[in-house]
Structures are given as structure tokens and as C-alpha cells.
């Protein structure tokens, strides 16, 4: 076994052990960022130690990975955290496959699929290479192996002989010193049978993780073969769908979308008078279908990519025909997406902001940007960069959720609506979690108690969060989140205790919920009339 192999084994073991150290019985938080940084640092060390260097594309992707991995620490919102985790893991997979050449920038969707299979194969098969003798060591390996086993046997024999000696002397020392006796008792408590089983299971998954990670590290640093750079403008699959069939599919969808857009221009874009003539108000019409329209846009984008990949276009004229139809299709889809955006905005104005509406609120612009990018790529004959555009927009959407603080955004928008005379649901505000607390606190201290209609509701929401803080599961620095740290600081500030006195919170055992007193009214904490 060479020194190079030892480095791979040690770093793989460190990454596997870090999973147990950072995540065992801990919520997601700072631990995910530290683990991602450890993987990147270990990979860079191995690349440098092998006298190689990563491509500039890899350095760029490392920045993206660290930014995405920071989201679970910065935010408590579950979708923001999930987006951060998925983007960071996707980036780590791209790095594992293209660390030295940076080919992720040129990959197609089909290359992503093949990359997954390559990485799975490397994770299972490559680790065995680490336990093979290095070049020139074949002749000496059997004696060396025999000597290693002999040393292990002698160590085990020594431990067996030392055990009764340590037990006898340890019992005497425990009798002589009560503090030492307590320490020994605690040690023995941790060595109970159920603890030993737990430690054995944890050791097993650490070794399994280290095994797979070592294979991925080998694939990243010492690839089995040089992979040529993909050509985004050539299809990996041979087109088999005829030109006529492709145009019929596009044409049928175009007719359907054109009819829908015509209705949108007449009713949704034409003003409330047209809607009232059909028996609808703006708010009633807006409630219907904005999620479905977003799904139509996503499916249309997928349809475009499938037809572009599988459709035959053997002459320049047919290529131009497909481009024209595709551009019209994408333009119509963007209008449909605009309709969805208008419906969503009217829905938000009528009923306020919720988590699902806010996710969609930020998703639609990024989906529109993707559609516009794909339209431009089609016009300039660079449709092969669809995968890069998709990954870029996914990064943009995920980082946007983290930067704007979804829950804080909901608080600001709904409080602004309340200041304008609309209803503010205290139950929904207290259902959001710790990302909302710093924003609620900033709003409360800057409000005028006499003139602000939302003052009492915001203060009562803070009181609900303060009461529920003691019910938060315990964890240490590994599961820390910035929002939770800020909330703890706010609730432990003596200057804020007056808020809890103004809005007393009581636990109702019969209904298993907190209620907060606003004036002479008891309002449930964490109960919302709508969660869509």
C-alpha cells in the first residue's frame, strides 16, 4: 500500500467519521456546511498531493457548493434547506466526476444520467484499489501481510492479559478516590451492552460511508480514464421521431396554447368588466389555476427538450421550421406563465402570503428566465446548453430563497397588508418558525402602538414564539441555525420581557395548544385558517 493510498483512506475515514460526529442525533444546521467544506478541503488536498490541479470551472462550482451548503445554517425554512442540500450535493457530484477537467459546464441532461452511473460504479468498485500493493511491492506483500497479522495477534494477546490487572488495580484506586470512582462509573455506564451495540452500528455506517467516499475520491483525483469533453450541440441519442410527427405535436400544442392565450387576453388581461360579464370577480378568477399554469410551463419546457433531442431534422429548412415553431411555443408559454403570475399576485393581494404562494412567487420569475434563456439558445443554435441553463436557474432559485428569507418575507408582506387595513392571522404568523422571529421583532420595535393596526398582533406573535421556545428540542453547536441563535438572543434580552407581560401566553392542556391574550380576547397560537 503506497502513501498515496493511505492519504485516500485517511481522508475517506475522516469524511465518514464526520457524518457520525456532526449529524448523529443532531438537526440540520451548521453541521452540513462544515461537512461540505471538509469534503472540498479533502479533495483539494488529494489533488494537490497528486501534483494535479482542478480546472477553473471546479473552483467556481466549489463556491456554489459552499453557498448552497450554508443555507441550512442561515435559514430554518424547510424548502430553503432542502434546496440548499440538493444543490450542494449536486455540485459535489459534479465535482467528483469533473474535478480535473471542469466538463460539468458542457454536459447535457444525458451526461448527467451517465455521470450518476459512473459515480455509482466508482463508489462500489474503486475502493478495492486502495488495498492492492503499489507497483514494485508485489514480491514483498505476502511477508508484510503475515507480519501485520502477527503484530495484530500480539496486540490482542497483550490486551487480554492486561484486562484483569487493570480491573484489580482500578477497583483499588476507585475505593481510594471517590471522584475517580465517579469517573469510572460514568465510563462503565457508557460501555453498557446497548451502548456497545450502538457504537458498533455507528462504526459500521462510518466504514460503509468511508468505503464509498474513497471510491468517489479516487474517481475525482485519479480517474480510470480520461473522459472527452462533451459537445453540447450534438445529441447522444440518434433521433428517431420523424419531422412530420414532431411538427404535428408542436402544432397541436401551439393551437391549444394560442386558444388559451386568447382567452387570457380577453378576460384576465382585459379588465374586470369582462370577468364580471362571465360571473367572476378578479379574486375568484385568480384563485383558480395558477399552480396548474406553472406546471403547464414546466411540462412544455420538458416537451421542447424531448422533441429537440429525438426529432429528425436533416435539412437546414427543416431545422429553421423547427426553430420557428419552438420559438412560438416558448413565447406562448411565457405568456401563460405571465397569466399565472398575474393570478398569483391577485391571490396574494386578496388573501395574503403563505409559504406555498411565496415559493411560487419566486419560482415563476426564475422559470420565466429559464424559458427566455432557452428561447435565445434556440435562436442562436445553442440549444445544447439547456442543461447548463437549467442548473444555473436552479442555483439562482435556491439561493434566492435563502437570501430573501421566505418566512421573513411573508411576515413583512402580511404585516404591510394589515397596516393597510386588511386582516392579519396571528396563528399563521406563529406557524412559520424561527426565521420569522427577527423580522417580527424589528417590525414591532419600529411600530407605533397607537397608530399601527398590526401592533398587537405582531407583539402577540412574538409572545407565542417566546413561550414555545422552551419546547424546542435540545441540540448543540452542530445543529445550530443563525435564525434560532437570533431568536434565542431576542427572547433572552431582559428589555423584551415587557412584551411577554403585555401579551400573556397560556398552555391549554385540553386542546394541546398555546393561546395568547390580546386585550380581552384569547387567540390560539399556531392555528391558521389557510395553509395553501
Image (cartoon, rainbow, N blue to C red):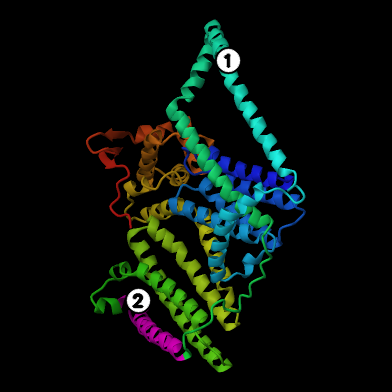
Discs 2, 1 touching: Cβ within 8 Å: no
The residue that appears at 50% across and 38% down in the rendered structure is 202
Q: Quadrant of the C terminus?
A: bottom left
- For disc 1, the marked residue is 166
The residue that appears at 57% across and 76% down in the rendered structure is 236
- For disc 2, the marked residue is 268
Image coordinates of residue 424 in percent, x first then y, are 33, 51
Is 272 contained in the magenta span? yes
Is 254 contained in the magenta span? yes
**What is the chief secondary structure element of the magenta stretch?**
helix
Bounds of the magenta segment: 244-273
Image coordinates of residue 161 in percent, x first then y, are 59, 19
| For residue 229, above or below residue 1 | below
**Which element type, helix, strand or loop, lies under badge 1?**
helix
Question: Can residue 162 be seen in the rendering of this structure?
Answer: yes
| For residue 376, above or below residue 488 | below
Image coordinates of residue 319 in percent, x first then y, are 55, 89
- Residue 373 sits in which quadrant? bottom right
Q: Is residue 217 left or right of residue 359?
A: right
The residue that appears at 49% across and 33% down in the rendered structure is 199
**Which element type, helix, strand or loop, lies under badge 2?**
helix
N-terminal-most mark, 2 or 1: 1
Separation of disc 2 and disc 1 at Cα? 84 Å
Q: Nearer the viewer, residue 274 or 38?
A: 38
Q: Nearer the viewer, mark 2 or mark 1?
A: 1
Question: Can residue 396 be seen in the rendering of this structure?
Answer: no
| For residue 279, above or below residue 483 | below
Q: Quadrant of the N terminus?
A: top right
Amino acid at each position: 500500500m503506497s502513501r498515496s493510498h493511505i492519504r485516500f483512506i485517511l481522508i475517506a475515514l475522516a469524511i465518514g467519521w464526520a457524518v457520525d460526529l456532526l449529524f448523529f442525533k443532531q438537526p440540520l444546521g451548521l453541521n452540513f456546511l462544515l461537512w461540505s467544506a471538509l469534503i472540498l478541503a479533502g479533495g483539494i488536498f488529494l489533488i494537490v498531493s497528486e501534483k494535479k490541479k482542478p480546472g477553473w470551472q471546479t473552483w467556481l462550482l466549489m463556491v456554489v457548493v459552499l453557498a448552497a451548503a450554508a443555507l441550512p445554517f442561515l435559514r430554518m425554512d424547510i424548502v430553503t434547506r432542502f434546496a440548499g442540500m440538493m444543490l450542494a450535493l449536486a455540485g459535489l457530484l459534479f465535482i467528483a466526476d469533473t474535478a480535473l477537467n471542469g466538463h460539468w459546464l458542457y454536459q447535457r441532461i444525458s451526461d448527467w444520467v451517465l455521470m450518476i452511473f459512473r459515480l455509482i460504479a466508482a463508489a462500489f468498485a474503486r475502493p478495492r484499489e486502495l488495498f492492492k500493493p503499489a507497483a514494485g511491492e508485489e514480491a514483498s506483500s505476502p511477508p508484510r501481510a503475515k507480519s501485520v497479522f502477527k503484530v495484530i495477534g500480539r496486540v490482542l494477546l497483550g490486551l487480554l492479559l492486561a484486562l484483569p490487572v487493570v480491573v484489580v488495580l482500578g477497583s483499588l484506586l476507585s475505593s481510594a478516590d471517590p471522584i475517580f470512582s465517579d469517573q469510572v462509573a460514568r465510563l462503565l455506564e457508557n460501555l453498557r451492552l446497548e451502548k456497545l451495540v450502538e457504537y458498533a452500528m455507528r462504526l459500521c455506517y462510518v466504514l460503509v460511508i468511508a468505503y464509498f467516499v474513497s471510491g468517489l475520491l479516487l474517481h475525482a483525483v485519479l480517474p480510470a480514464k480520461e473522459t472527452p469533453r462533451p459537445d453540447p450541440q450534438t445529441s447522444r441519442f440518434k433521433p428517431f421521431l420523424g419531422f412530420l410527427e414532431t411538427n404535428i405535436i408542436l402544432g397541436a400544442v401551439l393551437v391549444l396554447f394560442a386558444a388559451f392565450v386568447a382567452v387570457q387576453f380577453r378576460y384576465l388581461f382585459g379588465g374586470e368588466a369582462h370577468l364580471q360579464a362571465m360571473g367572476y370577480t378578479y379574486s375568484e378568477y385568480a384563485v383558480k389555476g395558477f399552480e396548474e399554469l406553472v406546471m403547464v410551463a414546466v411540462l412544455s419546457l420538458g416537451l421542447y427538450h424531448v422533441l429537440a433531442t429525438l426529432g429528425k431534422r436533416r435539412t437546414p429548412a427543416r431545422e429553421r421550421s423547427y426553430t420557428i415553431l419552438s420559438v412560438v411555443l416558448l413565447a406562448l408559454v411565457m405568456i401563460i406563465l405571465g397569466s399565472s403570475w398575474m393570478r398569483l399576485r391577485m391571490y396574494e393581494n386578496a388573501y395574503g402570503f403563505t409559504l406555498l404562494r411565496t415559493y411560487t412567487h419566486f419560482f415563476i420569475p426564475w422559470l420565466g428566465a429559464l424559458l427566455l434563456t432557452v428561447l435565445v439558445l434556440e435562436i442562436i443554435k445553442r440549444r445544447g446548453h439547456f442543461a447548463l441553463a437549467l442548473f444555473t436557474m436552479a442555483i439562482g432559485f435556491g439561493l434566492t430563497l435563502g437570501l430573501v428569507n421566505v418566512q421573513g418575507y411573508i411576515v413583512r408582506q402580511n404585516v404591510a397588508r394589515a397596516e393597510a387595513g386588511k386582516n392579519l392571522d396571528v396563528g399563521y404568523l406563529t406557524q412559520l418558525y424561527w426565521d420569522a422571529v427577527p423580522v417580527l421583532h424589528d417590525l414591532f420595535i419600529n411600530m407605533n402602538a397607537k397608530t399601527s393596526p398590526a401592533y398587537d398582533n405582531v407583539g402577540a406573535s412574538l409572545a407565542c414564539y417566546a413561550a414555545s421556545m422552551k419546547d424546542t428540542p435540545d441540540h448543540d453547536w452542530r445543529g445550530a441555525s443563525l435564525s434560532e441563535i437570533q431568536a434565542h438572543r431576542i427572547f433572552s434580552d431582559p428589555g423584551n420581557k415587557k412584551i411577554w407581560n403585555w401579551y400573556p401566553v397560556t398552555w391549554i392542556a385540553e386542546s394541546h395548544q398555546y393561546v395568547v391574550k390580546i386585550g380581552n380576547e384569547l387567540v390560539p397560537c399556531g392555528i391558521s385558517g389557510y395553509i395553501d
